[in-house]
Amino acid sequence: MIIVDVILIILLFALFAYSHTWLASIKIKRALAEKLGNKIAFYRLFYNASSIIFFAAFYAVSPKPDIIVYDLRFPFDIITFALQVLSLIGLFWASRGIDLKEFIGIAQIKRFINGEYNVDDLDEKQTLKIEGAFKFVRHPIYLFSILFLGFRPTMTLFYLTMYICVIVYFYTGSIYEERKLIEIFGDEYIEYQKRVSRIFPVKIK
């Protein structure tokens, strides 16, 4: 039954999302840092690689109902595709505010090899940069990812279910992420929260 497939997709995605969030928690990272010392430098790369593996496993076992929800015709399909391209450009723009080597985990390993790793950084050295896309929303990567995934000329039930799950996960994940950022940056981040919207730019200043 279709409803059973949808529920199973949601449950499997929730399982992936929980594991992804749990592994990203400061509590887990601090516990590992106590045991591993500065070898925690390798955790970020492990975290990213394991996330890809877990998501691939989720995708492989998940039911994929191929019911067509909508299929846009010309010229709406072209317009939607153009908006998707613009969203991708926005995603690259937002990514400029992130140190990709640090995000992936390569920079940490390089510092470890050079004997320069600070265990207090846990798995990532974080800096608060309020520039570029981050002036308009606190999570521009999430915003442009949502737009990119949503502007789709053809939508199946499987993709729509996944898309809704992703939006919920992004919003929920941003809450946990910001708790960590408040712990790291304190009042500076709290003031940033007051000035700038979370994901959608509804109160630009």
Image (cartoon, rainbow, N blue to C red):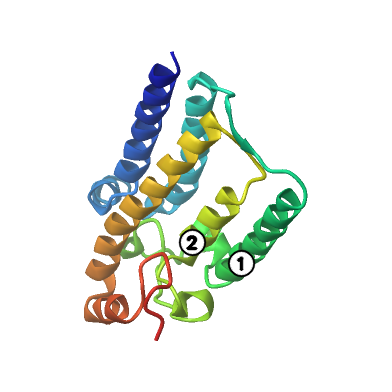
Residue that label 1 marks = 90
Q: Quadrant of the C terminus?
A: bottom left
**Is 82 drawn above or below residue 201 in the view shown?**
above
Is 155 on the left-hand or right-hand side of 194? right
Residue 39 image position (x, y, % from top left): 40, 50
Quick one: label 1 or label 2, which is nearer the N terminus?
1
Q: Residue furthest top?
A: 1
Are dots 1 and 2 in contact, CB under 8 Å?
A: yes
Residue 127 is drawn in which quadrant? bottom left
**Is 103 drawn above or below residue 1 in the view shown?**
below
The amino acid type found where label 1 is placed reads Gly
Q: Is disc 1 placed on a helix, strand or loop? A: helix
Residue 135 image position (x, y, % from top left): 45, 80
Residue that label 2 marks = 143
Q: Quadrant of the N terminus?
A: top left
**Is 165 drawn above or below residue 15 in the view shown?**
below
**Is 125 drawn above or below residue 21 in the view shown?**
below
Is 42 on the left-hand or right-hand side of 196? right
Q: Is disc 2 placed on a helix, strand or loop? A: helix
Is 155 on the left-hand or right-hand side of 50? right
Q: Residue at 42% across / 25% down in the picture?
A: 6
Front-lying residue, 141 or 148:
148
Q: Residue furthest bottom?
A: 205
Is 90 on the left-hand or right-hand side of 174? right
Residue 192 image position (x, y, % from top left): 32, 79
Q: Residue at 29% across / 46% down in the picture?
A: 32
Does residue 104 show up?
no
Q: CA distance from mark 1 to mark 2?
A: 9 Å
Q: Residue at 37% across / 55% down in the picture?
A: 38
